[in-house]
Image: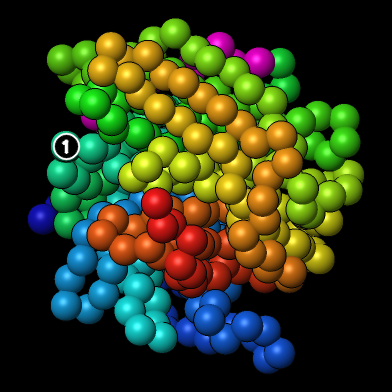
């Protein structure tokens, strides 16, 4: 198959991400597996794709900004291994992808979110990701910087959650929720938006991003990662917390409740978690990090019980 001309340029740049089974650095938690070697290979968001004999396939986005740099990869996560395969991006090239989520009931289709609030609907087939359409998020606030996106299917309806990440003591995260439908040509259509402020209880400090990703369990419990980022060489610090709950009523209304004092489930000093994805049929969360010049790491941990 001949690849689209606009997509071939970054395949060479993506070679560093290919098929590696890895271990964490000396002295670190050996449950973490290395999947990227530099600032271009970090994991900024993750979406469950499926299972094969080799393990669990998860699509991950990279927050690269220049043309020709990789945007999307598939990680096959097995027992003690994580193999990375770059995907070809076919269509309008985004800048700074920060989150991705599978569309419920639409096999092979995903929504990917850029940091400034553009949502890309993708169709993934093999090693190709084709842009079906894209649209801005509604109700973008001044200074919003988005790193998270999740979809919730309840009572026959679909809703989207996303959040401005926040920035230390002076700026809490803002969590947004809205009903979601699609136009016949694929464009995401958002309904009435609900907003809630949120502050994580760990980590704290001027560099804290209160929400670096979100995922929702089957019961509607919201998991959120938070992260402290002192610069491209760290040090980093992260946690995953019970952040609140979301409900979509039979009438399609979205009810969003955020915890005033979120319960910390796990802390991960030394890592900057930017991806949290509950894996269907298990209690496991897939976690991914974007550790800037130190690359990226992934692991699973049982945080997604109802």
Q: Nearer the viewer, residue 299 or 283?
A: 283
Q: Residue at x 30, y 43 (%)?
A: 102
Query: Residue 296's spot in the image, x, y percent?
Result: 57, 67
Query: Residue 193's spot in the image, x, y percent?
Result: 49, 12
Does 138 lie within the magenta span?
yes
Q: Nearer the viewer, residue 128 or 254?
A: 254
Does 146 lie within the magenta span?
no
Q: Quadrant of residue 121?
A: top left
Q: Nearer the viewer, residue 95 or 257?
A: 257
Can you say whether 219 is above or below 164 in the image?
Answer: below
Query: Residue 209's spot in the image, x, y percent?
Result: 73, 44
Query: Residue 242's spot in the image, x, y percent?
Result: 58, 48
Quarter occupied by the N terminus: bottom left
Q: Nearer the viewer, residue 24 or 191?
A: 191
Judge left or right: residue 199 versus residue 131: right
Which range of residues does the magenta coloring cover? 132-141
From where the camera sits, is residue 291 visible? no
Q: Quadrant of residue 158?
A: top left
Q: Which residue is mark 1?
A: 105
| SS assignment at label 1 | loop
């Amino acid at each position: 198959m001949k690849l689209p001309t606009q997509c071939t340029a970054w395949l060479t740049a993506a070679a560093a991400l290919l098929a590696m089974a890895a271990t964490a650095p000396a002295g670190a938690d050996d449950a973490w597996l290395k999947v990227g070697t530099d600032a271009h290979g970090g994991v900024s968001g993750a979406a469950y794709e499926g299972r094969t004999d080799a393990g669990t396939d998860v699509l991950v986005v990279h927050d690269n900004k220049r043309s020709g740099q990789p945007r999307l990869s598939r990680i096959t996560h097995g027992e003690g291994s994580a193999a990375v395969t770059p995907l070809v991006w076919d269509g309008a090239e985004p800048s700074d992808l920060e989150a991705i989520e599978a569309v419920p009931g639409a096999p092979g289709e995903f929504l990917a979110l850029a940091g400034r609030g553009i949502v890309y609907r993708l169709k993934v087939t093999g090693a190709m990701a084709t842009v079906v359409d894209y649209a801005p998020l509604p109700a973008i606030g001044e200074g919003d910087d988005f790193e998270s996106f999740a979809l919730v299917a309840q009572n026959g309806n679909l809703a989207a959650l996303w959040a401005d990440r926040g920035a230390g003591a002076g700026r809490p995260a803002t969590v947004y929720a809205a009903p979601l439908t699609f136009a016949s040509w694929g464009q995401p259509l958002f309904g009435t938006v609900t907003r809630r402020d949120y502050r994580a209880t760990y980590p704290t400090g001027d560099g804290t991003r209160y929400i670096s990703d979100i995922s929702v369990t089957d019961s509607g419990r919201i998991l959120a990662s938070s992260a402290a980022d002192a610069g491209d060489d760290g040090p980093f610090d992260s946690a995953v917390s019970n952040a609140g709950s979301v409900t979509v009523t039979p009438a399609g209304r979205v009810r969003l409740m955020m915890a005033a004092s979120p319960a910390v489930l796990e802390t991960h000093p030394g890592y900057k978690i930017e991806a949290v994805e509950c894996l269907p049929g298990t209690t496991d969360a897939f976690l991914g990090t974007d550790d800037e010049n130190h690359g990226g790491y992934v692991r699973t941990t049982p945080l997604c019980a109802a």
